[in-house]
Image (cartoon, rainbow, N blue to C red):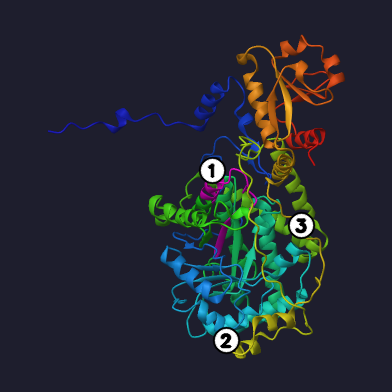
Amino acid sequence: MKQRISRERYDFEKATEQMWVEEAERALKGKSIETLSRKTYEGITLRPVYTEQNSRAAHQIPGHLEKQNGWEVSQKLQKSKTPEELKAEIHEALKCGQDTIHLEDVSFLNTYEDIQIAFENTDLSATPFHISLKENIGFFPIFTAFLKNRNGSGRFAFDPFGEWIESGGSRMPLSDKLDAAADMMKALEEANLPDVKTILLDGQIYRNAGASAKEELAYIFANAIELFNALKDRGVPVDVIAGRTAFSFSAAAPFFMEIAKFRAAKKLWAAVLSGFGADPLKFPIDLHAATSLITKTKHDIHVNMLRAATEAFSAVAGGVSSLSISPFDEVLGKPGKTGERVARNTHYVLKEESHLSKVQDPAAGSWYIEELTSELAEQSWKEIQAIEMIGGFAEAAKNEYIQNHLSSLLENRLEDISKRSVQLIGTNVYANLQESAYEAKAEERVKPGKSTANSAPDIAKWIQDAYTVKATELNSLMYRDELQDGVKPLLQKRLSEPFEELRAASSRFKEETGSFPSIHVVVLGEPIDYKARLDFTAGLLAAGGVEAKITAVDEAEEDKPVILCGTDEEYKLLDLKNLSEKHPLFLAGRFKTEYAASLYQGMNMHEFLKNLHSHLGVK
């Protein structure tokens, strides 16, 4: 007879929240567990412990989370410059596992015949498209005519208000752009293309300008509200608007906040639809994501693989419909084959090896993420309400409320990078001074010719004439040479750029002189005494492209800066006053003296390195 183990006898004691707190505070040697809490850029306080008892997840804005498993592999196809090249690129991408045709530049597809060549032997009823219409609305009627008998599905990336605030105006009057958006929706209804979206509202422009997850959510949905009202005024039914609208968000960091952001987006979309009288269950959100540009770096670029992989993981765990993963070398200008392959295959590692495509809402049930989702949705909704109080998205942009808020957030982020409160591997920490500088030049998109714009677009007629007209001709009828409806543009900047500028100046200095800029570093005492501070100092200098030259104090050139590395006791034995009269003097570590500045963790590294460049003659 088999022996049975009594479950009751061997059960562990159930751990209460108080038991966790007591154990944590024991490890903290008497400090309160609240000392582990920290504030995020969203203004949310992250607590050390989340349980069912202390979760606020039940107190939510109206809405729900649609379940999602599986996503479109939507890598950008960005190398072609002719219809024939694009045809080959599409077929190669589909053969390698891509399942969406994602095109940011179609300026070289000018006629119906061009489109026929590019999409020959491509089944658009089985392969969705994702095509940007930025400053190229003339492409829409020609491609729509091409789609008519093919039952295609996909997204036209067109964001009237987003493009306007991003550029600081529009080469087409905003009212005409909104007229075009309304006409596009009506045209797709008439063409019986129910699975084609005409609007893709872009949250990446706000994230790349410094937004936290809260602002990205708030501004994209405030934009949606403004657009719904504008299109309703132009006679488009709410259900049509809802069915023709998609969203594109950045996938950035931190990891768990990003998962919460994508989940919160679903709740906010449901709340917006309910406010306009549409049924959220009838119109689940079409949610695209692209790994963030703001987090990528030009130095130690292979780290971008890791960043993109974790960002992609957060996006699919948050339940996106479609995902673009940036190649690790895209930030250099033009990605290579290796970068493109690694990025594309990252999808399949997440799908087939991590099995994320086999789970609906992988984050569900985590009290931490559930709470973040709820609080993030609430905070974003409050920001949306604040924008509505101003008069809506357009008024908030005209009053520079959005731009100024984002500028302030970007400044805070850059300061945190400068102080190493936020670390970028290979940039402000663990920089490799000997890394070869390389930067490919990005090819410019084809610029539109001289405008003859004098009237609003006539989308319906242009679809009828699609076989004989050219996209460039149609664009010339719509777009002006100068920006219309001017507004303060968004300032978009990668977080690593300030340090990359220092490294670029250092590389130019080396080209001119044969060596990197350098500074004398004097070590005091035995290696065990100075090594930690020397490692810190060398790492700090490398982030600015400056070489540390170990030397004796009496060998340093007069009037040239010198860094001392040793213990505080060693510093007390030196005549710092006399040394400071001969050299601009720095001490590694926090050491208070009127004769030298201290180098320490938490200082503004970028400011120090910029001033040091000036001392060393680096332009």
* Above or below, comparing residue 160 to residue 356 in the picture: below
* Above or below, comparing residue 365 to residue 171 in the picture: above
**Callout 3, which amino acid?**
Ile
**Callout 2, which amino acid?**
Glu
The residue at 61%/40% (across/down) is 435
Instruction: Specify which label sits upstream in the sequence, 2 or 1.
Output: 2
Quote the CA–CA distance across marks 1 and 3.
29 Å
Query: Of 273 and 128, which appears nearest the observer?
Result: 128
Q: SS class of the residue under badge 1?
A: helix
Residues drawn in magenta? 285-311
Please tell me the numbered disc located at residue 400.
none
The residue carrying mark 1 is: 368
Is residue 236 in sight in this rendering?
A: no
Is residue 110 in sight in this rendering?
A: yes
Please tell me the numbered disc located at residue 190.
2
* Above or below, comparing residue 259 to residue 103 in the picture: above
Please tell me the numbered disc located at residue 402.
3
